[in-house]
Amino acid sequence: MAPTTEPSSLAELRNVTAGYRGSAILQGLSLRANAGGITGIIGPNGAGKSTLLKVLLGYLRPMSGSVWFDGSDILALPPEERISAGIAYIAQTKSYFASQTIDENLLIGAYLVRDRQLIAERREAVFRRFPILGTRRRQLAGVLSGGEARLLEIGRMLMTAPRLAVLDEPSIGLSPKMVDLVYDEVRKLSSEGVAFLIVEQNVRKLLAVADFVYALDNGRNRFEGSPAALADRDLLAELYFGRPSRHTPDATRAST
């Protein structure tokens, strides 16, 4: 039997404690996002998901622990340098400029890129991927539907050629059809080598696409493993509905 190859880690939080005004939200949290994989993060409100993203993106310095990307400790790097290193972010709230055209939004997304030819090539690649954006490139982004605006946000993210795409609630406010379309693009981009770290309340949809999932509760890992392993447990009912679980409150590692 041939030995299995452990997926290579692209981004990691190692034993991170973080919070606000001396109060710890994350308490010794560790997680990893593998290169080319789709890593999901679930948990109820207050579990620490937003704080986790702020630490990873450089908007919040942890009290202790470290943040790694591509084998290097990036704890001291500001957000813009983390973007340059290959981390992109799409926020839960609107993260495009409604008063600017689609074309202008894409150019704004490439503000760290200095090569004009490369910018043009990436913009045309976005239009090939999302033809609806190409045909409306001179229209104001504010006239787009919620689903179309999400595609624009993905397109703007692609202008940085990210290695890790961090998505916060990508399905929020979208119709089921548009949610399917967004996650279809996640699958395609993952197959092209982009790694994803996705925080999502649409648990069913996330578990259908993720390779690995973390369940957070009170700033700690309650579960880490494959979506199939999580589906076999009753932890979801406890996390979201307060039903008793057969499992202990300690973090559970399931085989993938």
Image: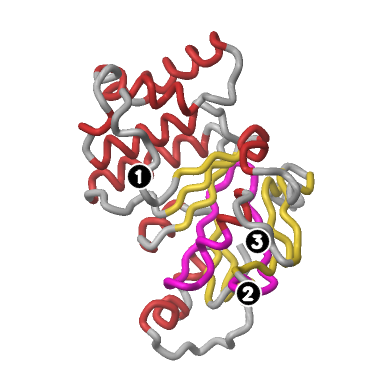
Residue 2 position, x and y percent, is: 75, 49
Q: Which mark is residue 94?
A: 1
Instruction: Check the image and name the residue furthest to the front.
Output: 21
Residue 59 position, x and y percent, is: 60, 52
Please report the residue visible at 75 percent of the width from the left and 48 percent of the height from the top: 76
**Secondary structure of the residue carrying numbered label 2:** strand
How many labels sit on residues?
3
Give, as a three-letter code, the residue at label 3: Leu
Q: Which residue is mark 3?
A: 31
Q: Nearer the viewer, residue 56 or 248?
A: 56
Q: Which residue is mark 2?
A: 24
Give, as a three-letter code, the residue at label 2: Ala
Q: Earlier in the sequence, mark 3 or mark 1?
A: 3
**In the image, residue 49 above or below residue 245:** above
Q: Nearer the viewer, residue 225 or 31?
A: 31
* Label 2 Cα neighbours within 10 Å, binned few <14 / some 14-19 / many ≥20: some
